[in-house]
Amino acid sequence: MPFEIDRFSHIESTVQRWDPRIKILSLGFFIFVVALLKTIPVAVASLLIALIIIKVTNIPFHFVANSIKLVIILLVPFFFMLPFSYPGEAAFRIIGLPFALEGLRLSILIFTKAVAIVLTTDAIFGSSRFDISMIAMQHLKCPKVLVQMVLFTYRYIFVFIDEIKRMEKAMRSKGFVMKANMNTLRTMGNFVGALLIRSFERTSRVYSAMLSKGYEGELHSMVRFKAQGKDFVKAGLVAILTIAVLATDMLRVFTPAIKGWY
């Protein structure tokens, strides 16, 4: 499946051999700090760190690029909205609309941080099997319900996508052509209804199967984690870089991009 974030988790790398629990804690802390940054140069530095981390994972760039494309599609509108809506002094006007450079700087800050966060997230979950990452989160005392919801959602979203493709193929084989008319709306309504019913029935069968195998609200696994010294060395290196990034941002060496934003 093209959307499997752990498709290349089998590739050997320093990050891949990192204990998943410590990896999630360390890189999760880095992500948290990146989200708090307020200066563009420091955000760019965090982006470079994220690029180095993703490079170390040896995950193919074309796979990572798919995530970046989604970020670009979602965040490009900020470059058109914020400069014209920022409540600061306008540097000049475009078609009669005030254009604030502060809004442009804020757009750049948001975009840079978002890309850095997505790259780091790819490094976390792309270098380990997704189920192992979820088990690691459970070991880190994350709410069991939340962990299981994420795990099952990730597991069965691909099943539902395959179901949609099969139903769509069956509809086309019967001569259905999507048009802007009531017949298409009626057919698509039946399509969505059938998909929801099949999804509910599948959910009931899966849950019954889990109960029959002794499920009591907690996931059990034979996976065992054992942290080694090198795992803590990696964590220490990431912690040093993260604290350096945060300190540089808090010292106000550079002008905050959100200065004047109320």
Image (spheres, rainbow, N blue to C red):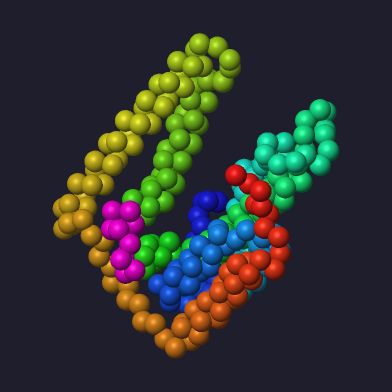
Q: Residue at x 37, y 25 (%)?
A: 193
Tag count: 0
Quadrant into which the C terminus falls: top right
In-front residue for pair 69/258: 258
Q: Residue at x 46, y 22 (%)?
A: 188
Residue 164 visible somewhere in the drawing: yes
Is 128 left, or right, of 252 in this rendering? left
Q: Is residue 85 above or below residue 124?
A: above
Q: Position of residue 114 (x, y in %)?
A: 60, 54
Is 163 left, or right, of 75 in this rendering? left
Quadrant for residue 45, please give it.
bottom right
In-front residue for pair 231/190: 231
- In the image, the segment drawn in magenta is 138-148
In-front residue for pair 156/141: 141
In-front residue for pair 255/244: 255
Q: Residue at x 57, y 62 (%)?
A: 34
Q: Position of residue 110 (x, y in %)?
A: 63, 51
Quadrant for residue 21, please give it.
bottom left
Magenta: main secondary structure equals helix
Q: Is residue 158 above or below residue 170?
A: below
Residue 54 visible somewhere in the drawing: no
Q: Position of residue 102 (x, y in %)?
A: 72, 47
Q: Position of residue 254 (x, y in %)?
A: 71, 64
Please tell me whether residue 154 belongs to the stretch shown in magenta. Answer: no
Is 50 left, or right, of 202 in this rendering? right
Q: Residue furthest bottom?
A: 229
